[in-house]
Structure formats: C-alpha cells, structure tokens
Image (cartoon, helix red, strand yellow):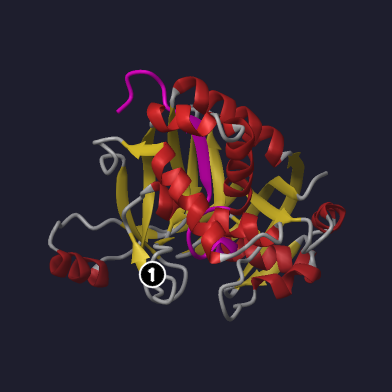
Amino acid sequence: MGELALFKVTVGITGFSGYLYTSKLVKTLLIKSIPELSKHFEPVKGPVPKLLHITPLYVFNRETGKVKCIYSYIECKSKNIIKCREEVASARPTRVELNGVYYFYVGVHSSIIDESKIIAGLQEMPKCIDFMGQRTCFELYEIEYQDPHLAASEAASRVLSSNGLKVVFSSPAMLRDPLRPRRRVKTFLPTPINVFATPVYAMLYAKGKYARKNLMGQLLRLHRFFNETYSALGGLRVRWVYYSKKPEPALVGYVNYRIDEEYRDHLSSRISIQDWLREVFAYTMTLGVGAGRAAGFGHVLLKPLHAGSI
C-alpha cells in the first residue's frame, strides 16, 4: 500500500429511523472500531488540512442500477433567496430509515494511521451501539481496498483521451474559495480552482512542499488546463443538509470541464501531464473536496467527458 489508501466498507445496518446525515453514524462506528482515528476527527486550528475523509452511507438499487447517497435534506423550490430560507425553515427534511445493506468510503494518508489498523479495527466493529437514542446494529460484509494512484492513473488517461472531465459530487460538497483564505465563506461556483483547492493543498502539505506560491501555481495551472462548459451550472443543485441542528446549503450533481488544447500543448512540453493529473486526481478521489471532508462532505467521482457532452 502507498501513501494514500481508500477503503470501501459494506455493512448491513438495522435499527435507525429519523433525521440524519449518515456520515455521523459512520464517524461514530469508526471511532468505536478504531479509537486511534478519533483525534483526527477533532476540529483543528489554522490552515492544516485533515488527511482523512469519510462519506455518508450509499445504497445500490439492483433494479435501477443506480446508487443513492443516504442523508436527510431539503431542496428549495423557490429561486428567491428570502423565500428559500423561509421554505427551508418551515419544511421537514427527508427521513432516513436504515434497514439493509449499505457501503461507505474511508480515505486516509499513511502519515496518520497504518492501513492495516483500519482493516483490523473494522473487522472487530461492534455488533450494536447506542446511537441517537436508538439501538443500531451492524454486520460487516466486505472491506475492499482501492489503490488511489492506480484508479487516478486510469482516470487521468481516460480524461486526456476524451479531452474532458466530469466531476460528480457523490456526497454534498461545501466548496471554499482559496483566494479568500481568511474568510470561512462557502462558494457555489464550481470552478477548477474552487473544486481542486483543498486536495491540492492536502497534496502539497503531505509531501512537505506547501507554500502559498506553490498552491497558487498548481491551481492556476488547473484553471488554465480545464475550462468550464457553458452548461457548467446546469448539472448542479443546492440541497440543504442536516449535519447539526442548523441546515447547511451544499452542492450536489456534477460539473463538466473541457481541456484547453492550446494550453495542453504548451504544458506537455514542460511536464508529464499524465503524471501531474494522476497525483492531483489521487488526492481528490481519496481525500475529497471542499470543507467538512472528515465529516462526510465532498466525495467526488472523476470521469471522462464523452463526446457530445456539454
């Protein structure tokens, strides 16, 4: 195993009904199974990125072939921001009923914990726990190790061949603008800079290469390499999710980028684009994007943008 590891954990879960962002249950299960991880879920002061990422629960529907991310939310129907806030304040979020087989992801950097400890801890996960006043029980089905660098290399090759990238927000994302580092303000514009800022920051930090100029240099390169399509906002929507008592707006859906061919030709004479994208993609796929990654936000899938897509 390398510096990054991504685990897909399949579990049977019974005994919960209510309003929940299901990564809270995942986090509780992980802390009880792997106590060494607990300190990495705690809030940190300053700009140090967390090298840990988890997701909410997912369920696969065999009849439709589709995957659903499980969490309580409200979608605002009004375009007026004042009416939208009133609607969110008065509406009741979707209810979560856990009684079936689900899976979640855990992504880590090797500097925070040995991957073998994650496997060993999950294999000894508790049968039942008291969670939000309910007796919730688990049955481990499978722990699947996924090599992020191998997956990222394949994704980079396919993206370069298709000349485009589709970023799918598999779990709700709360993006941050790296040009406003001192303001904890969310952004809802999925530009390449805003999407890749956090994983690039984590990559440079983990490799001991972080400096503000290095971060901005990498982000500027991504900004020039990927162009948003004119339909960039068409695949996105905002959902108000319930992680704590107060609903928070987050992005779901997808965004499409096309590769700038002129800049690609220029860049290819200076670096190996395949190797560069592989590293950026590996950290993005493993550690997620935006804020709240250790709380289950910002899990993404990176796919080639097929011909005809806009």
The residue sitting at 44% across, 56% down in the picture is: 173
The one of 229 and 303 positioned closer to us in this rendering = 229
In the image, the segment drawn in magenta is 288-310
| Image location of residue 150, percent across then percent down | 70, 33
Where, by quadrant of the figure, is residue 56 drawn? bottom right
The image quadrant where one finds the N terminus is top right
Dominant secondary structure (helix, strand or loop) of the stretch shown in magenta: loop
Image quarter hosting the C terminus: top left
Q: Which residue is mark 1?
A: 180
The answer to whether residue 56 is visible is no
* Residue 36: percent from left, percent from top: 80, 70
Q: Quadrant of residue 118?
A: bottom right
The reply, left or right, for residue 214 in relation to residue 31 is left
Secondary structure of the residue carrying numbered label 1 = loop
Taking the spot 31% from the left edge, 65% from the top edge, the residue there is: 92
The tally of labels here is 1
Describe residue 75's horizontal placement relative to residue 115 as left or right: left
Q: Residues within 10 Å of mark 1 (few under 14, many from 20)?
A: few
> Among all residues in the image, which is located at the extreme bottom?
45
Q: Is residue 275 above or below residue 102?
A: above
Quadrant in which residue 142 is drawn: top right
- Residue 223 magenta-drawn? no
Q: Residue at x 51, y 37 (%)?
A: 302
Residue at 25% in and 72% down:
89
Amino acid at the residue labelled 1? Arg
- State whether residue 237 appears in this view: yes
79 or 186: which is nearer to us? 186
In the image, residue 269 lies at what x, y percent? 55, 29
Q: Position of residue 82 (x, y in %)?
A: 14, 70
Q: Is residue 143 above or below residue 174?
A: above
